[in-house]
Amino acid sequence: MVGFALDRLWCETMGLIDGDSKERPLRLVAEVLAREGVPYALIGGVAVQMHTVEPRSTLDIDVAVPRFEDVPREALLAAGFEYTGRHAHSDNWRAPGNGPLATRVAVQFSAEDVGIAAAVAHATSVVLKDGLRLQVATAADLIVLKLAAAGEPQRRPSKREHDLADVLALLEEHPQLSSPQLAASVREIRQRLSDTGLGG
């Protein structure tokens, strides 16, 4: 995947330790979740990578699970992941690795939030060239999640703009998902960002 190649290039450019790329943690997370029987859906940038043609790089792994208690803590710890705390909308971990904790791939579990249950329920199985099987949120569910994130006032403005860009990229790739209501939601969020001097 082009997105993975971009991520690896970024790691090399930044001088990060060889092996501290996103592919290995993604495989490990998928293996742990499958082994523990946890229903999940990849969301965020990784999922957008899989639904669009244009290259989309991302440095973290976002996973939706039905409830926070479904996060397989003991299995993740046994696999070498390190827990870094809970935020309002996510349970946060860092991948195993040789580098400092802050340089390792972030893994964020989201649950009990707008669109999460639907994303997990509708997730489709995707098999990559090397045989890695992943559960990925549909483009329609990703749009719902991205719009919710873009509308979150506490979220960084740059992140909110990025969320809107992802929505537009998904709609370009999947025009059948477009609707007047969706277009109105995008315009409303853009207007709110513009009104606060944060949008274009």
Image: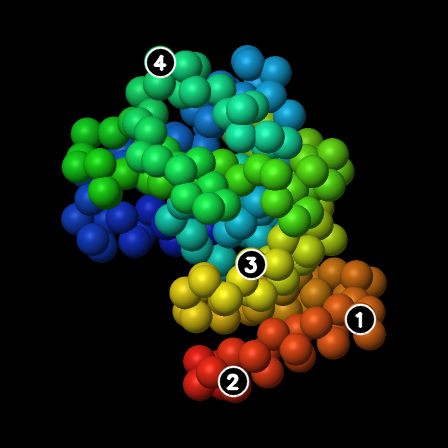
Q: Residues at badges 2 and 1 in contact (C-beta under 8 Å)?
A: no
49 lies above or below 120? below
Q: Is residue 79 visible?
A: no
Q: Is residue 133 left or right of residue 99?
A: right
Crowding at dot 2, Cα within 10 Å, few <14 / some 14-19 / many 20+, comes out as few
Nearer mark to the viewer, of 4 and 3: 3
Q: CA distance from mark 1 to mark 4?
A: 45 Å
Task: Evaluate if marks 1 and 4 touch, with contact meaning CB atoms under 8 Å apart.
Answer: no
Question: Is mark 2 in CB contact (under 8 Å) with mark 4?
Answer: no
Seen at 61% across and 45% down, the residue is 113
Check disc 3 and report the residue beneath it: 149
x and y percentages locating residue 64 in the rendered image: 58, 37
**At which x and y percent is residue 129?**
56, 33
| Residue matched to label 2 | 194
Asked if labels 3 and 4 touch by Cβ distance under 8 angstroms, the answer is no
Q: Nearer the viewer, residue 46 or 15?
A: 46
